[in-house]
Structures are given as structure tokens and as C-alpha cells.
């Protein structure tokens, strides 16, 4: 996220999202501002994926599982701090581990390549698992959250072929 913070397209993405307004609940790293949690997650994860040096599960079709999970976790922890007084470190680690596990297991199971940008299309499930764990969803609520995530799973590899800056945004949208 630090390395990608000054990458092409990030300033423009920040400028657009900062105009949307909303509750100042989660930090945008290195920007000295707070935005609604979904927008902060999008920006932080987009910065994290901008240079393509984030973690990679090669056996899972080169998915980058951590960027969407961490973007989600950082935003949710910030938003919970105002409500609950903070999140314990062990709960953060458990949520990250759960999110990574979910993303990696889906990536390993989904072996047929259909042209999806796997980091985005699969990362949304890891981000959902991590956020759901942090906010204490019941099993029924988590199932519903996965259904919502499934309806948002997206991202294609055309941006990779074209070298388009939207590749980094897809990981952010998954967060």
C-alpha cells in the first residue's frame, strides 16, 4: 500500500472518491483523511495492488489473496473503533487468517480459467469472511453476506492484457 500510494491513477481515484462524502469512519493510508469504510477499503486495496508486488498464491492461478482482505480488515477495524472502542489484535489476526484461507481455498478449487481476474472475483469472498468475522456475524448472517459477495464478484483480465489502471481498482472493489 505504501509503494502503490503514488502510482498512476491513485490520485485520480482518491479525488473522485473524496468528493462522494459520507461518514468519516476509516483511514485512507498516507492521505491524512478518513472516508466511509467501503471507500477507504477500495482506496487502500487499490494502492496495495497497484505495483503487483502483493502476495501471490501461484498454485491458485496467481491470485493475490491478501490485498482485498487487508483493505477490508483495515476499514472495518477503523469503523468499529468508534463504536466498540477498538478491536483486539488477536481478533484482527484471526479475521485476516480466515479471509486468506477462504480466498485461497476458493482459488484452489476454481481451476477452470474463464478469463476472470481471480484476485478480484475471488478476493471478495475473503474480504467478506474477514469483515463478517470482525463484526460478529452469525452463521446465517455470514451465509447471507457470502450471497451478497457472490452478487458482486467481478473483474476480468482484459485490464491485464491492455495494461489498464483498472486492474488495481478491481482488487479495491473486492475489498
Image (spheres, rainbow, N blue to C red):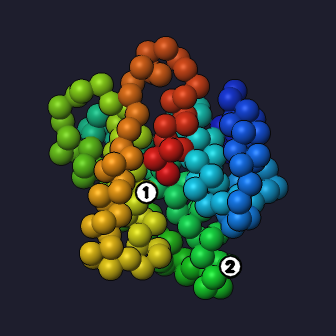
**Residue 77, image x, y percentages:** 58, 70
**Residue 88, image x, y percentages:** 55, 81
Closer-to-camera residue (60/46): 46
Q: Considering only vertical position in the picture, is 128 above or below 55?
A: below
**Pointer 2: what residue?**
82
Residue at position x 58%, y 48% from top?
A: 42
Q: On the image, which quarter does residue 36 sit in?
A: bottom right
Give left or right: position of 116 versus 110: right
Residue at position x 58%, y 25% from top?
A: 165
Closer-to-camera residue (102/157): 157
**Can the viewer see residue 118?**
yes
Q: Considering only vertical position in the picture, is 60 above or below 90?
A: above
How busy is the neighbourhood of tag 2: few (under 14 within 10 Å), some, or many (20 plus)?
few
- Disc 1 element: helix
- The tag on residue 127 is 1
Alpha carbon of mark 1 to alpha carbon of mark 2: how far? 21 Å
**Residue 144, image x, y percentages:** 30, 66
Residue at position x 64%, y 69% from top?
A: 78
Q: How many marks?
A: 2
Q: Considering only vertical position in the picture, is 173 above or below 100?
A: above
Q: Considering only vertical position in the picture, is 69 above or below 79?
A: above
Q: On the image, which quarter does residue 32 sit in?
A: bottom right
Give left or right: position of 170 versus 128: right
Give left or right: position of 109 versus 8: left
**Residue 65, image x, y percentages:** 40, 47
Q: Earlier in the sequence, mark 1 or mark 2?
A: 2
Closer-to-camera residue (55/86): 86
Name the outermost residue toward the top.
162
Give left or right: position of 154 versus 18: left
Amino acid at each position: 500500500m505504501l509503494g502503490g500510494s503514488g502510482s498512476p491513477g491513485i490520485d485520480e481515484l482518491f479525488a473522485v472518491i473524496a468528493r462522494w462524502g459520507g461518514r468519516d469512519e476509516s483511514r485512507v493510508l498516507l492521505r491524512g483523511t478518513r472516508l466511509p469504510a467501503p471507500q477507504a477499503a477500495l482506496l487502500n486495496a487499490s494502492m496495495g495492488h497497484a505495483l503487483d508486488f502483493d502476495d501471490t498464491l501461484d498454485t491458485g492461478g496467481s491470485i493475490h489473496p491478501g490485498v482485498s482482505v487487508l483493505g477490508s480488515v483495515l476499514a472495518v477495524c477503523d469503523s468499529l473503533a468508534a463504536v466498540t472502542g477498538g478491536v483486539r489484535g488477536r481478533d484482527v489476526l484471526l479475521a485476516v487468517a480466515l479471509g486468506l484461507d477462504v480466498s485461497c481455498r476458493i482459488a484452489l478449487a476454481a481451476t477452470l480459467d474463464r478469463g476472470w481476474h481471480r484476485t478480484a472475483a475471488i478476493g471478495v469472498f475473503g474480504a467478506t469472511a474477514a469483515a463478517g468475522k470482525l463484526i460478529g456475524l452469525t452463521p446465517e448472517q455470514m451465509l447471507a453476506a457470502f450471497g451478497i459477495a457472490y452478487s458482486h464478484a467481478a473483474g476480468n483480465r482484459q485490464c491485464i492484457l491492455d495494461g489498464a489502471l483498472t486492474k488495481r481498482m478491481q482488487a479495491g472493489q473486492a475489498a
